[in-house]
């Protein structure tokens, strides 16, 4: 059941790679009612990426905001309808679809399939998987994998995907380790780009 550790923790990550640096904040939070958590779940992500090759006119920083609200009725067993609003450096969009979420002390699985509310919509598939088994005492292994795949329905030859991998250790609210980001896009002069480095993550 999604609900474990969603109370007030806000994970904040800094990643320094060989090509770019990023700041990332992502969390889940239920709306409250008189009985505690309501079925309404809010997902939020804010991400800023800066390219080391940045000039006044090129390779400028990129910003992304994602806010999603889903209705998680217990009888749906983790499935939920979801509405998504996204604001990027050059675009604003709304999306709707289906979400699935499961969380325990050691793992998180969160995914959705959403369609852009537009005449020529993009279709997104997003997966966030995290596994943090106990090693010893308060020390845990930290692993996280993300994938975002987007298909353009007007021109199906346009397909983009992003993968982010984090591997390290976690103690209490602090995690650190190795990081890798990969981006792929068809019909591009540079179809694949990678960024490898280290990350530090803290849960406020």
Image (cartoon, helix red, strand yellow):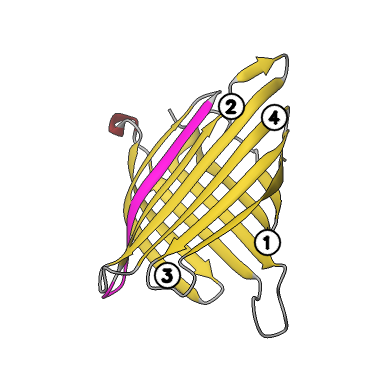
Q: Using the image as rendered, state which of residue 156 and residue 83 is in the foreground.
A: 156
Residue 105 location (% of width, % of height): 55, 23
* 3D distance between C-alphas at marks 4 and 2: 8 Å
Check disc 4 and report the residue beneath it.
170
Q: Are marks 2 and 1 in contact (CB under 8 Å)?
A: no
Circle nearer the N terminus (4, 2): 2
Q: Which mark is residue 93?
A: 3
Residue lying at 49% horizontally and 70% vertically, measured from the top left: 190
Q: Would you name the residue on which mark 1 appears?
A: 20
**What residue appears at the point 67 percent right and 85 percent down from the top-left corner?**
57
Which residue appears farthest toward the top when viewing the image?
Answer: 137
Disc 4 from disc 1: Cα separation: 24 Å
Q: Which mark is first along the chain, 1 or 4?
A: 1
Q: Are marks 3 and 1 in contact (CB under 8 Å)?
A: no
Res. 30 visible in picture: no
- Looking at marks 2 and 1 on the same chain, the residue that comes earlier in the sequence is marked by 1
Residue hosting label 2: 132
Instruction: Name which of mark 4 and mark 3 comes first in the sequence.
Output: 3
Extent of the magenta region? 107-120
């Amino acid at each position: 059941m999604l609900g474990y550790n969603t109370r007030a923790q806000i994970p904040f990550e800094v990643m320094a790679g060989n090509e770019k640096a990023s700041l990332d904040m992502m969390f889940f939070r239920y709306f409250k009612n008189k009985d505690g958590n309501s079925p309404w779940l809010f997902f939020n992500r804010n991400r800023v990426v800066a390219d080391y090759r940045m000039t006044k006119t090129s390779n400028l920083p990129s910003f992304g905001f994602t806010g999603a609200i889903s209705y998680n009725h217990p009888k749906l067993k983790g499935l939920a309808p979801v509405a998504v609003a996204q604001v990027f450096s050059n675009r604003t969009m709304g999306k709707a679809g289906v979400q699935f979420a499961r969380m325990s002390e050691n793992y998180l699985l969160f995914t959705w399939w959403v369609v852009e509310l537009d005449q020529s919509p993009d279709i997104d598939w997003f997966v966030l998987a995290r596994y943090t088994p106990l090693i010893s005492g308060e020390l845990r292994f930290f692993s996280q994998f993300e994938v975002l795949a987007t298909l353009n329905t007007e021109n199906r030859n346009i397909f983009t995907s992003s993968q982010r991998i984090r591997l390290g250790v976690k103690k209490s609210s602090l995690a650190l380790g190795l990081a890798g980001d990969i981006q792929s896009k068809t019909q591009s002069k540079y179809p694949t780009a990678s960024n490898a480095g280290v990350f530090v993550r803290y849960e406020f």
